[in-house]
Image (cartoon, rainbow, N blue to C red):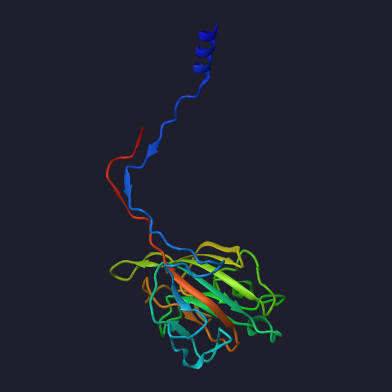
Amino acid sequence: MIRIAVLLSLLAAPALAKEYLTGKQWQEPTIITPGETCGAAPSDAVVLFGGEDLSAWNGAERWSVKDGDMVVGKGKIYTKQEFGDCQLHIEWSAPTPPKGKSQGRGNSGVFFVSPPGKNGFEMQVLDSYDNKTYFDGQAASIYKQTPPMANAMRPPGEWNVYDIAWTAPTFDDAGKLKSPAAITALHNGVLVLNHFELLGDTPFDRPPTYEGYTSRGPIGLQDHGNPIRFRNIWVREIKAPVGEQVREPWLR
C-alpha cells in the first residue's frame, strides 16, 4: 500500500517547468544610492538647483534665490549642460494669494531641448487650482497638444512636484525625424502623461514642428511674468541596460 501511495503522489506531482533563457549576457546594472528622503537627488543625478545658487543656468542674472527657492525673474533661463533621454525632478509653487485668471495666473513652463532661439518642448506650469483655462494649456499639459489625464494641483502657496521621464526625438543623418519625442510624467505622484508622443515643439502661434531640432539640448524654465518659485531640481541621464547576445534564446 505504501508503494502504491508513493506512485500515485509522483503521478500527481506537476512536471518541472522549463526555463526560458534570453541568450544574452547582461552587464550588471549600475548601483546608485537613492535620496534619503522622497524627492531627494540620487547619487548619479546632476543637481540643477539645490537651494544656493543659479550657477547651472544660463541667463539667470535677473532671476534670484530667496529663502532657498529659485524665483522667476526676467527672461527665460536654460541649463548650461545639454540632455537627451533623461529623468527630471522639479518642484514649483504658485504665488499666494493668487492673482489673475486663466493663463495669467502662476504661469511658467518646463522646456526640453530648448536652446536660445528655439521654442523647445514644453510641459506647462500653471496655477490650475480652481482656475479654468483651455485644457491643453493647464498645469502638466503638453502645451497646445494634450491635457493631462488629471488635474492634481495643490492650492497656491503649496509645493507641486513633477517627476518626468523624457524620451528625446531621434533624427537621421539628414536631420529627418526617425522617432518622435515622448513623455511620461507624474504630478504630485499622480500619472498625468503616459508615454505621450509629441507632434513637435510647443509654440503658441504656429503648428508644431521638429524641423531644426536635435536629440540633445538644454532644459529651460520660462518667464511668463509671474513670480513662480522652484526648488529641488535634478536630472538623470537615462541609459538602457547593456547586454550582448551570446547565444540563441532557448528553453532548459
Q: Is residue 81 visible?
A: yes
State how many labels appear. 0
Residue 129 image-quadrant placement: bottom right
Q: Position of residue 249 (x, y in %)?
A: 33, 39
In the image, residue 119 sits, relative to residue 179, either above or below, namely below
Q: Left or right of 223: which side holds 215?
A: left
Q: Camera-side residue: 17 or 145?
A: 17
Q: Camera-side residue: 178 or 181?
A: 181
Q: Position of residue 227 (x, y in %)?
A: 60, 87
Q: Left or right of 101: which side holds 174?
A: left
In the image, residue 203 sits, relative to residue 163, either above or below, namely below
Q: Left or right of 159: which side holds 8?
A: left
Residue 30 image-quadrant placement: bottom left
Q: Is residue 139 visible?
A: no
Q: Which residue is pictured at 51% across the width and 21% down the height?
A: 13
Q: Which residue is pictured at 71% across the width and 85% down the height?
A: 97
